[in-house]
Image: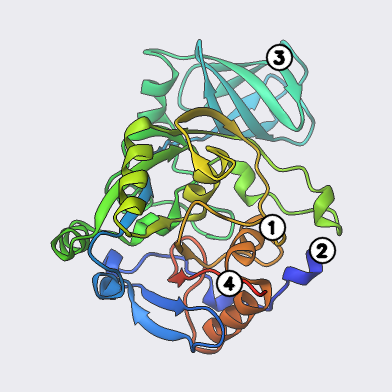
Amino acid sequence: MKKSDFHYDLPAELIAQVPLPERSASRLLVVPPTPEPFADCCVRDLPGLLQPGDLLVFNDTRVIPARLFGQKATGGRVEILIERLLPGDEARAQLGVSKPPRPGSRITLDAGGEAEVLGRDAGFYHLRFHVPNGLPTWLEHAGRLPLPPYIQRTPDAADAARYQTVFAREAGAVAAPTAGLHFDDALLDALRARGVEVGHITLHVGAGTFQPVRVEDIAEHRMHSEWFSVAPALVEHVRETRARGGRVIAVGTTVVRALESASHEGELQPFSGETAIFIYPGYRIRSVDALLTNFHLPESTLLMLVSAFAGRERILAAYEHAVSERYRFFSYGDAMLLWPEQETA
């Protein structure tokens, strides 16, 4: 398939720049299989759309303040976006610089301390930080929240809370698992009262999630790698849910990536490690029965993933509907509840 097969036109004013005052007030476009019509709902309607015994699976990763600024010895300014924390106060990072720094050079950080350039691989720099109290602790007060590139403003104090899910607990992501941003404590309580159960995986979302597909033949695209963990307790929870006839609903594409990566011959297994899985039409998603997700960028790998689940034509029709109805798009935008494409004989 071609990258252009996943294009749609989006007016810039529909890209949400700020979150709504209430998380669960976002709109929810329900997309059942063809030929059933779309339904315009609200995220807080979710308890009525699910059944007792269903299992919602969330990503409990926590976004770290991964953006830093500094300067080279020559005086040139440097922007650092940490992609992943590594042992020993080291990190893999992207650098915004006019001229690439050489291994052994040092960057003086605006927040104090230095970053030493150890090397470069596949577009990422390997850095060692010389900062007090260790890099993870130091980042909490020295780093800036890495809002996505399509949010064209400086992060403010409100973003520190709103660009995290209310259940975030495992620090390591540089982008939020945005489908989870719609859930607040009141909605979670309402879901539990309905008899809907909750489970968690961890997948540390990397900056690669925003990287464009640069080849027209999508089969040639090289997918970025992310660390994830599916614990034995979640595997058992999924098995119990299916045994009693319940449905497994992924909250976000990161959950789908984790569950599919941890499945072997259709059987979910505990796993911790890397995944570079690339899901696009032709791939059959077996691990989940429904998917709650935000709207994704044109021609992106995430749009390809949801197209694999619900069907490319169905997804593009839903996006056309969302544009005409003035839904809000991307990280701080509205959501969709997708049901899988019906198999044809």
Sort mark 1 into few (<14), some (14-19) or many (20+) by Cα contacts within 10 Å: many
Give the mark, 3 or 2, whose residue is nearer the N terminus: 2
Residue with the mark numbered 1: 280
Q: Where is residue 270 in the image (x, y as percent from the top left)?
A: 44, 31
Nearer the observer, 257 or 170: 257
Numbered disc 3: secondary structure: loop
Q: In this view, does 154 lie above or below 195?
A: above
| 3 and 2 marks in contact (CB < 8 Å) | no
| 4 and 3 marks in contact (CB < 8 Å) | no
Give the mark, 2 or 4, whose residue is nearer the N terminus: 2
Give the mark, 4 or 1, whose residue is nearer the N terminus: 1
Residue with the mark numbered 2: 1
Identified by mark 4, the residue type is: Glu
Task: Say which quarter of the image contains residue 115.
Answer: top right
Q: Where is residue 43 in the image (x, y as percent from the top left)?
A: 32, 71
Which residue is depicted at the point 69% across and 76% down?
8
Which residue is depicted at the point 66% across and 34% down?
94
Numbered disc 2: secondary structure: loop
Q: Is residue 326 left or right of residue 251?
A: right
| 1 and 2 marks in contact (CB < 8 Å) | yes
Numbered disc 1: secondary structure: loop
Which residue is depicted at the point 69% across and 25% down?
125
Residue with the mark numbered 4: 341
Per the model, the C-alpha gap separating discs 2 and 4 is 18 Å
Per the model, the C-alpha gap separating discs 4 and 1 is 13 Å
Numbered circle sitting on residue 105:
3
Sort mark 2 into few (<14), some (14-19) or many (20+) by Cα contacts within 10 Å: few
Q: Is residue 22 above or below residue 198?
A: below
Give the mark, 1 or 2, whose residue is nearer the N terminus: 2
